Amino acid sequence: MICEERFFRTYGREPDAVSFCPYRICPIGAHSDHNLGKITGLALDKGIHIAYSAKQNGVVEMASVQFPKRAQWHIASIPSHPEGDWADYLRGASMVLSRKFRLKVGICGVIEGTLPIGGLSSSAAVTIAFMGALASVNGISLGAQELIDLAYTAEHDYVGVSIGKLDQSCEVLSRKDRLLYLDTRDGSYELIEAPRTMKPWKIAIFFSGLEHSLAGSKFNMRVDELRAGVYALQALAGMEYGKFREAAARNVPREVYDSYKDRLPEPWRKRCEHWYTEFERVEKGAEAWRRGDIEAYGKLSFESGWSSIHNWESGAPEQIRLYEIMTRTEGIYGGRFSGAGFKGCCMALIDPAFSEEVSRNVTREYLRSFPAMEGKYGVYICDSADGLA
């Protein structure tokens, strides 16, 4: 791996170990977890690797294959606020880990991502892989739920992204060839094994060529718009409500939304429409997977993508074009944006027998619309994989 080679060139020795965290996809359940919804997800056989060794002097010294500049701080004096660069997720992980455990040992390492950044939750994967490495050199053992909660806190509280626990949960709890069906309200989950009668499938990642930062996008704004709609619904229905940040769509029944949705400002209504319909799609999707009906599951994923465009109002033009091409490409069961949907990539569940045709046809149509993405755009065929638990 490149990260191991870079580590050797930098430090003149082999790393002590390599930490890994897989990327994830969420075919149905997007823009839901931050309001305590349900999701379905899969981990990929690609992800973040960190070649690392302990530093007994307490210094954290990290470099990235993808980004310039090396980040450095002492484990006893972690910057209290994000600095606006790629290492903020590492600083956040250091901060939340140090609040719970006494850290004495630092770490040096090199980070490598095996797919382009944007839409596969590389931020959560980096946070988890680094937190696991830092915990290891300090002799700390983290349970699955503890790792999920700490990684969530690092990204939500320190970096400042209004996420839920979808990303961390998929990357930790997933199992190869099983669909993670997670209720983010209480953390309960099921790993659904499809019957042998289900048609074969693989995961295609279509990288648009655009990279993004969730904190710098409209992601937080969309979450606030949804929460504003929920807050208004509670008031209109005479329900008790508390702080704005505690409002969650999961606590407002669908019947209340149906009764008062026409009194909401249009943006708020659309955000709520996506959340409530996505909740229903997740439940239908879990049942379709249980039956082994991947065509039905894929259709629901396409519907999720449509709602993300028209109700959540996300999607760069490049991503919307990819989605449109996917919906009419033979061999694709279903798919949508992956991640926040403002830039990055699209994912699809495909029939492996059509892998070459799917790659060729989607590439041809996309580059016909966006020729400037030649050399930046890419297709990656992946398998599902185990998470870290």
Image (cartoon, rainbow, N blue to C red):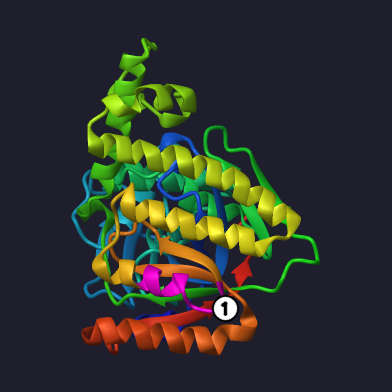
Q: Is residue 75 visible?
A: no
Question: What residue sits 26% from the left and 81% below the top?
Answer: 369
Q: Amino acid at mark 1?
A: Gly
Q: Residue 218 at what x, y percent from top left?
A: 23, 50
In this view, the residue farthest toward the right is 196
Q: Is residue 244 visible?
A: yes
Q: Nearer the viewer, residue 60 or 114?
A: 114
Instruction: Describe residue 79's horizontal placement relative to residue 43 as left or right.
Output: left
| Residue 280 position (above or below residue 176) | above
Q: Nearer the viewer, residue 334 or 79?
A: 334
Location of residue 306 by image quarter: bottom left
Location of residue 273 by image quarter: top left
Crowding at dot 1, Cα within 10 Å, few <14 / some 14-19 / many 20+, comes out as some
Find out whether residue 355 is within the magenta segment.
Answer: no
Residue hosting label 1: 331
Q: Residue 242 at what x, y percent from top left?
A: 33, 16
Q: Nearer the viewer, residue 288 or 124?
A: 288
Q: Residue 49 at what x, y percent from top left?
A: 47, 72
Q: Residue 25 at what x, y percent from top left?
A: 50, 61
Q: Which contiguous range is marked in magenta?
A: 322-332
Instruction: Describe residue 316's horizontal placement relative to residue 348 as left or right.
Output: left
Question: What residue sits 42% from the left and 27% below the top?
Answer: 258
Question: What residue sits 69% from the left and 60% below the top?
Answer: 293
Q: Which quadrant is home to the C terminus?
A: bottom right
Q: Secondary structure at mark 1?
A: loop
Find out whether residue 327 is within the magenta segment.
Answer: yes
